[in-house]
C-alpha cells in the first residue's frame, strides 16, 4: 500500500504547470504570478513553482479561488505582419489584437512567424496543444511557399527534401506547383515542428 501511495505522490503536478493546465495562463506567466507572491495553496502563500499539487488542494490568485476555465479551441486565418505571441519585445503587433477581449486566455499552438499567413490554432487546453505539437504525433502540416529560385521537377525527390542546418531537417513531401522565370511556388508538408524549419532550409540552399 505504501508503495502505491508513493507512486501516486510522484505523479503530482507542480504548481505552475497546474495553473497552466487549468487554462488560467501560460506556465511562464504562472511562474511570474508565483514569484510575485500572488498565488496561495490552501490559504498559504506559495512561491515555489514546482510545489506539488494534490487533488483537493485549493489554489487562489489574489485571494480568488482558481477554477478550470472552459476549454476554448480557435482557428485563425493569421495575416502577415502579426507575431504569434502574447507580447513582443520589439513592440510588433500580435495576433491577440484580433481576439475578442471577453475570451479566456488562449495561447498559439505552434508558431507562424511575422511574415507568414494562414491557419493558426489557439487554445487554453495545454494537454491538447502538447499533443498537436509533439513530434511523436506525426501530424502533417502543409505550407505553401514561394522561393526565389526556379525549382525543377526533382524538388520532390527524397534527397531534395532534406538539409542539415545544425540538425537534420526534412520534409515529408515537396510538390512543385508552378514556376516563373525567377521564382517557384511549392507545397511543403512537414510531420515535425522545428523552429523556422522551412526558412532555415531555404537559406541553406
Image: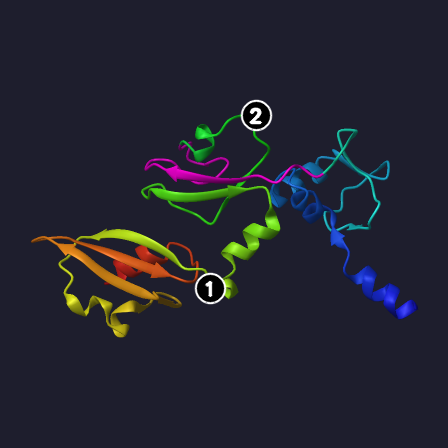
Which secondary structure lies at badge 2?
Answer: loop
Q: Quadrant of residue 189?
A: bottom left
Residue 124, horizontal then vertical, whole percent:
59, 41
Write down the residue under mark 2: 102
The residue under the point 18% across, 70% down is 154
The residue under the point 32% across, 53% down is 143
Q: Quadrant of residue 10?
A: bottom right
Distance (Cα) linking label 1 and label 2: 34 Å
Q: Would you say the magenta stretch is mainly helix, strand or loop? A: loop
In the displayed structure, 21 sits above or below 170; it is above
Q: Nearer the viewer, residue 21 or 204?
A: 21
49 relative to 152 in the view: left or right: right
178 relative to 114 in the view: left or right: left
Q: What segment is highlighted magenta in the picture?
A: 68-92
Identify the colour scheme used: rainbow
Which quadrant holds the N terminus?
Answer: bottom right
The residue under the point 35% across, 43% down is 118
Residue 101, horizontal then vertical, whole percent:
54, 25
At label 2, counting other C-alpha atoms closer than 10 Å, the crowd grade (few under 14, some 14-19, many 20 or more) is few
Residue 16, horizontal then vertical, whole percent:
69, 46
In the displayed structure, 38 sits above or below 26; it is above
As for residue 69 lying within the magenta part, the answer is yes
Write down the residue under mark 1: 138
Q: Nearer the viewer, residue 115 or 3?
A: 3
Which secondary structure lies at badge 1?
Answer: loop
Residue 136, horizontal then vertical, whole percent:
52, 65
Question: Residue furthest toward the bottom?
Answer: 159
91 relative to 12 in the view: left or right: left
The residue under the point 68% across, 36% down is 33
Amino acid at each position: 500500500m505504501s508503495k502505491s501511495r508513493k507512486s501516486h505522490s510522484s505523479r503530482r503536478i507542480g504548481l505552475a504547470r497546474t495553473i497552466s493546465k487549468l487554462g488560467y495562463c501560460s506556465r511562464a506567466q504562472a511562474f511570474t504570478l508565483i514569484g510575485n507572491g500572488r498565488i496561495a495553496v490552501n490559504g498559504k502563500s506559495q512561491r515555489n513553482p514546482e510545489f506539488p499539487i494534490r487533488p483537493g488542494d485549493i489554489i487562489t490568485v489574489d485571494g480568488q479561488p482558481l477554477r478550470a476555465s472552459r476549454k476554448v479551441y480557435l482557428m485563425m486565418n493569421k495575416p502577415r505582419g502579426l507575431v504569434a505571441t502574447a507580447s513582443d519585445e520589439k513592440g510588433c503587433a500580435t495576433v491577440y489584437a484580433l481576439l475578442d477581449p471577453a475570451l479566456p486566455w488562449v495561447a498559439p499552438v505552434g508558431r507562424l512567424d511575422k511574415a507568414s499567413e494562414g491557419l493558426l490554432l489557439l487554445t487554453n487546453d495545454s494537454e491538447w496543444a502538447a499533443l498537436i505539437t509533439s513530434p511523436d504525433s506525426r501530424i502533417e502540416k502543409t505550407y505553401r511557399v514561394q522561393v526565389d529560385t526556379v525549382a525543377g521537377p526533382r524538388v520532390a525527390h527524397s534527397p531534395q527534401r532534406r538539409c542539415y542546418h545544425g540538425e537534420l531537417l526534412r520534409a515529408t513531401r515537396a510538390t512543385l506547383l508552378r514556376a516563373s522565370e525567377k521564382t517557384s511556388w511549392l507545397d511543403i508538408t512537414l510531420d515535425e515542428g522545428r523552429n523556422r524549419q522551412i526558412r532555415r532550409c531555404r537559406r541553406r540552399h
